[in-house]
Image: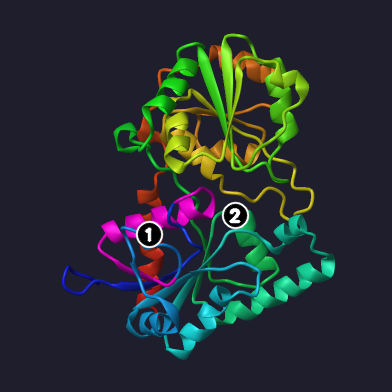
Amino acid sequence: MRNNRNPIIIGFFYYSFYPVKGGASVHGYNLAKELALKGYKLLKVNGEPDPYTEKKSGLWGLIYILLVSDIVFVRLDYFKKMRNFIPLVAKLFRKKVMAELNSPSDELRLFGATEMDIQKADRFMRFLSRFVDKFLVVSPPVKKYCTEILQLNNVSVIENGGEVFELEALAVSQEFQDVIEEITTSYDQVAVWAGSPNKMQEMSFIGGIGEALDATCALILITTSPIRLPESLTRRENIYVFSELGRDEVKWIIRQADIGFAFYEDYYWSRWGFYNSSLKVYEYLVNGLWVISNKEELIPIDEHIKLLNDPYEINELMRAINSNGLDFKLTRTWTKVAEEFEKQLIEVINSD
């Protein structure tokens, strides 16, 4: 289907993903990187220039991409932004379209949406689906949303993956390295939690773990925005908070830790329960960390994920875990994600 002289061209319409800051940008960047390394040519219109795509700007750039691309790939959501109408426009150019959807419309409740708003969002996505040849989703619950609410039968699941962080490739100051080394050499075990302090994350539970934390263990919290810890935790010398770090600094900390925490709320507002494909879990695993979570849905991913809900039991497990590191080959990288994506891409291109 492709060679060095005539690569397949993908119109790549994703959230802005460069520089990488976390969340959706991690997914977009790593998928683009792996597809480019496989020999595909990716064209985009938004965000800063990056090493793996070719940027075309403005309306004429969009038209150019739709003219020359072999297939269009777009990240959809429920907001009436231009990117979400790309499938419709692409069909005017007689292009085949693949779309990624990473959440059900229920997530809008976190932004104050009413039941009527949710129903409108479902109708909007059902309208957009008429112009999509293949939907890719990150978890079985999101697929269930697509099949039951959107009445789609062209949906496949491709879970997220993890990137192995190579320390020598990270742009981290010596001062920062020294700070982290001081922590990791002062304690038997170092656990890390990285993420946004939002309504999806079980932050109060993490606070309970901090209060139960043994003096031989440390907990590092990496947050996208400043958080206010309870006074009982601010007095603990073995709890550290880093806010608004660069992506390489986040990678450095994770690579140095022994255990990764992934605690989530019960998602009572979702008709489908917990539906995430946890980026942090895959990043922990491929970088040799054990994972402790309160979500049984994550357990099948790997035998090194432990399901616990009691802070004192978690403290005991932390003290017992062997921190010599795991075999990185056990878990899922972005290369595997790109292989699964490529299979779907070729099927769509070759379909009638």
Q: Is residue 348 left or right of residue 319?
A: left
Location of residue 297 by image quarter: top right
Residue lying at 29% horizontally and 66% vertically, measured from the top left: 40
Q: Is residue 185 left or right of residue 139?
A: left
Q: Residue furthest bottom?
A: 92
Residue lying at 38% horizontally and 68% vertically, measured from the top left: 345
Is 107 placed above or below 259 here? below
Is 6 placed above or below 322 here? below
**Residue 140: image tag:** 2
Residue lying at 47% horizontally and 30% vertically, measured from the top left: 253
Quarter placement of the C terminus: bottom left
Residue picked out by circle 1: 32
Q: Nearer the viewer, mark 2 or mark 1?
A: 1
3 and 199: which is toward the camera: 199
User: Residue 101 placed where, x, y %?
Assistant: 57, 63
Q: Magenta region: which residues?
A: 20-45
**Residue 141: image tag:** none
Is 48 placed above or below 211 here? below
- Mark positioned earlier in the residue sequence (2 or 1): 1
